[in-house]
């Protein structure tokens, strides 16, 4: 009765939280299984950022609840953002859920499962739910355990939880709570341990990583705590690459821009959420920058690293977004020439400042605007990949590709490359000559005499 299947919805933070829960459960004697039909416990780690994400998890939970009818000992748990957002009210729609655990209580999951099992074994009446969505001081320090696959080359490290920005559309400050950073020494130690275990690339994670440690550490000679952290991770011998997500445009002061010129492991890939290219909408969203300032950051970064790759988040159809506002977004989107972008249709999140705004944009208009940006993105991405044809790129070999044909890795610019390699090259940085490109993916061959397969 100890096989646990964890299904994760949403962002990389959620993936990381699920991994930490899995590590804790393993240490407690549970088995983490990949086959949901062969589990005794199913945990859904949920997302609330758009309504669609919540509906997906609710649909799944309702489906799985049927399984409980056949096997009353089957345990169903809902974790993370939707658990935090809706709490015990979830039971109205999903009365059969056994466990509801919020975003500051992931580390309690093993205890709660133990308790549920003990109660079952003692013959307690089935159907009492454990709900814990309380805040907990220091909970940001509990996301630290990893489940590493054999020869795992990349890993995510949580550096901070929560966000204090209050963007008008965003539920995250409610689901994730106040900004809380982990101590820098602990993060560095975790990165060192990962490097010792063979990890070569680390992505530092948080809701607003550029604000990391701002209340806990002082600036030294104009260098923010976040850049101090980057410097320390950059100095870890076994690591080869550093990435981070998500930053906020207002964190791109000179120290961070210059870091791209001097920290050799910091990859020339930036996820820089724009949200909108209209100053009027940015103000309504409570995003503290203008389109001009945003463009300036992109230009500054390209000056330091002419080969910089960019991705972004855009929301189309924020309440009151006119054709003219969207034209501004479209223009800035084209000008920035993104390599990758996440384009979202605005979704009303109850409890956020924007939820009550008049002038909601019709779905059909959102869809149209969404498609327009996606078409531009596709063209940009294809164009960028075409420029890489015939070049030799530094690729970190991650492992066999999922379809079992050869190996896959990524360039520093985060482009996926497929190529033939050998098992022993996993974890190595190798030169790959790009021979073919689709819109999204590159294909190539090892360009190093003597290391072929
Ligand atoms: N800083 C965070 C943002 C989390 S939300 C991070 O990336 O870690 C991720 C993205 O979802 C946001 O950048 C925004 O573009 C989008 N988003 C947030 N709330 C939304 C809403 N109500 N409707 C549509 N998209 C939304
Ligand atoms: Fe959300 Fe804005 Fe923070 S998008 S996570 S409130 S920076």
Image (spheres, helix red, strand yellow):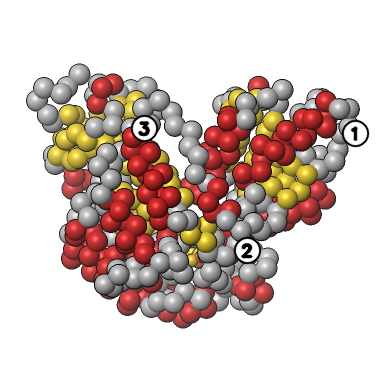
Picture residue at 18% right of the left edge, 41% below the top: 393
Q: Mark 3 falls on what kind of element?
A: loop
Q: Nearer the viewer, mark 1 or mark 3?
A: 3
Q: Is residue 94 visible?
A: no
Quadrant placement of the N terminus? top right
Picture residue at 77% right of the left edge, 30% below the top: 117
x, y (%) of residue 259?
24, 61
The mark found on residue 174 in the picture is: 2
Q: Which residue is mark 1?
A: 125
Q: Are marks 2 and 1 in contact (CB under 8 Å)?
A: no
Q: Mark 2 falls on what kind of element?
A: helix
Front residue (pair 172, 23): 23
Residue 180 horizontal side relative to residue 241, left or right: right
Structural crowding at the residue carrying mark 1, measured as other residues with C-alpha within 10 Å and reported as few (<14), some (14–19) or many (≥20)? few
Q: Are marks 2 and 3 in contact (CB under 8 Å)?
A: no
Q: Which residue is mark 3?
A: 197
Structural crowding at the residue carrying mark 3, measured as other residues with C-alpha within 10 Å and reported as few (<14), some (14–19) or many (≥20)? some
Q: Of the two numbered discs 1 and 3 on the same chain, state the one appearing first in sequence.
A: 1
Q: Is residue 450 visible?
A: yes
Picture residue at 61% right of the left edge, 33% below the top: 25
Residue 145 horizontal side relative to residue 299, left or right: right
Residue 372 horizontal side relative to residue 13, left or right: left
Q: Of the two numbered discs 2 and 3 on the same chain, state the one appearing first in sequence.
A: 2
14 shown above or below 316: above
Q: Quadrant of residue 439?
A: top left
x, y (%) of residue 153?
34, 34
């Amino acid at each position: 009765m100890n096989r646990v299947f964890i299904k994760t919805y949403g962002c990389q933070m959620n993936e990381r939280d699920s991994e930490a829960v899995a590590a804790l459960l393993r240490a407690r004697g549970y088995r983490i299984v990949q086959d949901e039909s062969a589990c005794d416990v199913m945990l859904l780690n949920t997302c609330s950022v758009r309504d669609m994400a919540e509906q997906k998890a609710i649909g799944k939970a309702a489906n799985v609840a049927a399984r409980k009818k056949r096997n009353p000992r089957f345990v169903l748990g809902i974790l993370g953002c939707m658990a935090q957002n809706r709490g015990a009210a979830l039971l109205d729609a999903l009365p059969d859920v056994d466990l509801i655990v919020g975003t500051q209580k992931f580390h309690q999951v093993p205890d709660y499962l133990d308790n549920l099992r003990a109660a079952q074994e003692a013959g307690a009446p089935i159907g009492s739910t454990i709900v814990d969505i309380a805040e907990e001081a220091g909970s940001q320090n509990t996301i630290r355990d990893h489940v590493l696959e054999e020869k795992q080359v990349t890993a995510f490290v949580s550096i901070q939880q929560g966000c204090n920005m209050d963007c008008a559309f965003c539920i995250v400050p409610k689901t994730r709570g106040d900004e809380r950073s982990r101590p820098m020494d602990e993060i560095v130690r975790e990165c060192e341990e990962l490097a010792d275990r063979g990890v070569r690339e680390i992505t530092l994670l948080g809701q607003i990583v550029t604000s990391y440690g701002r209340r806990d550490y002082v600036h030294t000679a104009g260098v923010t705590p976040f850049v101090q952290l980057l410097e320390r991770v950059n100095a870890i011998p076994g690591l080869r690459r550093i990435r981070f997500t998500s930053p906020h445009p207002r964190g791109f002061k000179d120290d961070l821009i210059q870091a791209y010129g001097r920290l050799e492991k910091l990859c020339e890939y930036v996820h820089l959420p724009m949200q909108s290219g209209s100053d009027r909408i940015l103000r309504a969203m409570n995003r503290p920058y203008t389109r001009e300032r945003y463009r300036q950051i992109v230009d500054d970064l390209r000056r330091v690293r002419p080969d910089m790759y960019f991705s972004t988040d855009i929301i189309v159809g924020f309440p009151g977004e006119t054709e003219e506002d969207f034209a501004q977004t479209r223009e800035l989107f084209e000008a920035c020439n993104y390599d990758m972008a996440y384009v979202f249709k605005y979704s009303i999140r109850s409890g956020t400042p924007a939820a009550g705004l008049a002038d909601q944009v019709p779905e059909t208009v959102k869809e149209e605007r969404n498609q327009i940006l996606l078409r531009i993105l596709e063209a940009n991405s294809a164009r960028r990949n075409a420029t890489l044809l015939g070049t030799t790129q530094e690729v970190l070999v991650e492992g066999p590709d999922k379809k079992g044909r050869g190996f896959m890795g990524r360039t520093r610019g985060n482009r996926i490359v497929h190529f033939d390699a050998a098992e022993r090259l996993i974890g190595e940085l190798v030169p790959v000559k790009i021979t073919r490109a689709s819109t999204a993916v590159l294909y190539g061959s090892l360009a190093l005499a003597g290391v072929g397969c």
